[in-house]
Amino acid sequence: MAKLRVGVIFGGRSGEHEVSLVTATSIIEALDKNKYEIIPIGITKQGAWVAGENALAELKNHRPGLPALLSADAGSHQLLMQKGASGLLPVEKLDVVFPALHGPFGEDGTLQGLLELMDVPYVGAGVLGSAMAMDKVVQKHICRQQGIPTVDFLWFRDIDWRSEGGGQPFPALPDQLANRSREEIVGSLIDALGLPLFVKPPNLGSSLGISKAHDRRELFNAIEEALQYDRKVLVEKAVARPRELELSILGNEYPRVSVAGEVFPGNEFYDYDAKYVDDNSGLEIPARLTPGQLRALQETAIRAYVATECEGMARADFLMEKETGRFYLSELNTIPGFTRISMYPKMWEASGLPYSALLDELIELALRRQERRRTLRTSYEPKRDWYKG
């Protein structure tokens, strides 16, 4: 049988660019070379596309590579690459794409929209599921509507913070702060949620831009930090002495969930350095939970996955109060870290699904979803050619 051509896309215009390179390295190394022909496709921090066997090394070393792009022509599935003076020429027809991008312009539905236009199968959530899960404010709204527990939160837009309450009056949502000065926003946050508070850019991962504010001054600074990365800010009540628990979800229409893992952050919370740089955090898989606690977390993870229209894969992160056992969904991550030591594959390995077999199943899920979509009608024949007049 001919090998499937798998385009692995990595890098991207996101603060999580470096994390994506590490994810892609593990995926490319682990994909079965007897089954797949692997096409590395990189996106630089400036948004330039490069491809070829050296694309990963070129991005890691900040070297220019061969220009490339994906054709949006639904009939071609083509990767176009620079060939001498001839310009961009089709060189590969992709059978399936494995996005290894984290954060904006890759995990948020934008890349998924391009792949939909190409009519090429791809791993992971679709446009809507990617977009809803990426925006933590929207994700929380959807989950709360379905009775899924989340920590108390408020949010506001950059224009609300910058205008100092002097903008055009705006009919705010119940959990949105608007039409207030900065002092009023900060006061409302403290009055409603108390201290300490977690301040986050909603459309980013890897804990980038996230701060824990213990007082009014830190809260001001945390908001300014979050607004460097996003056009709105999410502020959450801190859970006292929480356990940080994670589960992996896999599947399309009938998803299944792994055992749970527990993270023991080396820093005050599981920030970027604790995850990737300092190497002082601990992991335990499986987490020490009662059967009832594990079942409740697994059922909630599946409900959140379905409610946000996730497909393929996601990692569900929870916070559990040590004293009461009460838990809250922190977030769903539709393209979680995917190195061999990342929680998503490690929890599946502990559940009996090895890394390489997990990659095979994700690709198979992408192909099956595309087969189902292609059975849908995409055109309609009017009874008269009324549109020609």
Image: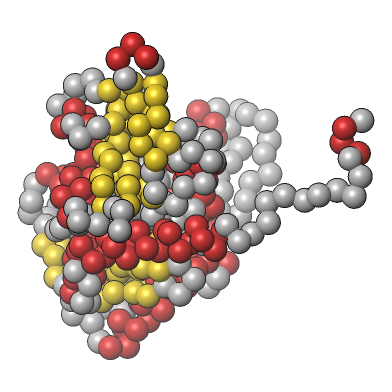
Foreground pick, 252 / 243? 252
The type of colouring in the image is secondary structure
Q: Can you say whether 185 is above or below 330 in the image? A: above
Foreground pick, 216 / 283? 283
Q: Which residue is found at the position 53% from the left and 35% from the top?
A: 73
- Percent across and percent down for residue 339 are 18, 53
Foreground pick, 196 / 258? 258
Residue 171 position by quadrant: top right
Check the image and name the residue furthest to the front.
1
Q: Which residue is found at the position 68% from the left and 51% from the top?
A: 378
Q: Is residue 84 left or right of residue 251?
A: left
Q: Can residue 186 be spotted in the picture?
A: no
- Percent across and percent down for residue 261 are 21, 70
Q: Quadrant of the C terminus?
A: top right
Check the image and name the residue furthest to the bottom.
291
Q: Which residue is found at the position 25% from the left and 87% from the top?
A: 290
Check the image and name the residue furthest to the top.
85
The number of numbered badges drawn on the structure is 0
Q: Is residue 265 left or right of residue 220?
A: left
Q: Quadrant of the N terminus?
A: bottom left
Q: Is residue 336 left or right of residue 374?
A: left
Residue 221 position by quadrant: top left
Q: Can residue 303 be spotted in the picture?
A: yes
- Percent across and percent down for residue 187 are 46, 45
- Percent across and percent down for residue 59 are 21, 29
Q: Which residue is found at the position 15% from the left and 50% from the top?
A: 29
